Image (cartoon, rainbow, N blue to C red):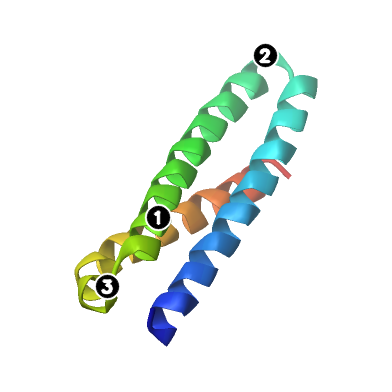
Amino acid sequence: MSTRQEAMKEKVSAKITRAEAELKRLRAKEMEAEADAKDKLQEKIAELEDRKEEAEKRLEELKQAGSNAWEDIKDGVEDAWQSLSDSVSDASKRFQ
């Protein structure tokens, strides 16, 4: 695995770990929330879970990819990473 692949793998893994922590925080907040806020939290939790699953899928592809295949999947991995990053940031801002 190339240095660039390793760096990307580490970034995506760190983002997944951050997303898992944010999901845990949001689930705890959901239990205390009023009905209207609870609905919004559930929507954001579902979105974040979807993005995390996509990032995990891309991370697995990255782990399995050889040096030549890396270039083929790099954009998909970066897109999944950015999407997850945006969702985590949005959730953190909206539900502090």
Q: 88 or 20: nearer the eye?
A: 20
Q: Secondary structure at mark 1?
A: helix
* Disc 2: CA contacts within 10 A as few (<14), some (14-19) or many (>=20): few
Residue 60, numbered circle: 1
Residue at the spot x=71%, y=25% of the render? Answer: 30
Q: Within the image, what quadrant is residue 16 found in?
A: bottom right
| Whether residue 27 is situated above or below residue 95 in the rendered picture | above
What kind of residue is marked 3? Trp
Residue at the spot x=69%, y=47% of the render? Answer: 21
Locate residue 71 relative to residue 7 in the image: left or right.
left
Locate residue 7 relative to residue 20 in the image: left or right.
left
| Tag 2 residue | 35
| Whether residue 38 is situated above or below residue 78 in the rendered picture | above
Q: Within the image, what quadrant is residue 20 found in?
A: top right
- The image position of residue 45, as x and y in percent, is 56, 33
Q: 8 or 32: nearer the eye?
A: 8
CA–CA distance between discs 3 and 1?
Answer: 12 Å
CA–CA distance between discs 3 and 2?
Answer: 45 Å
- Comparing labels 3 and 2, the label whose residue is closer to the camera: 3
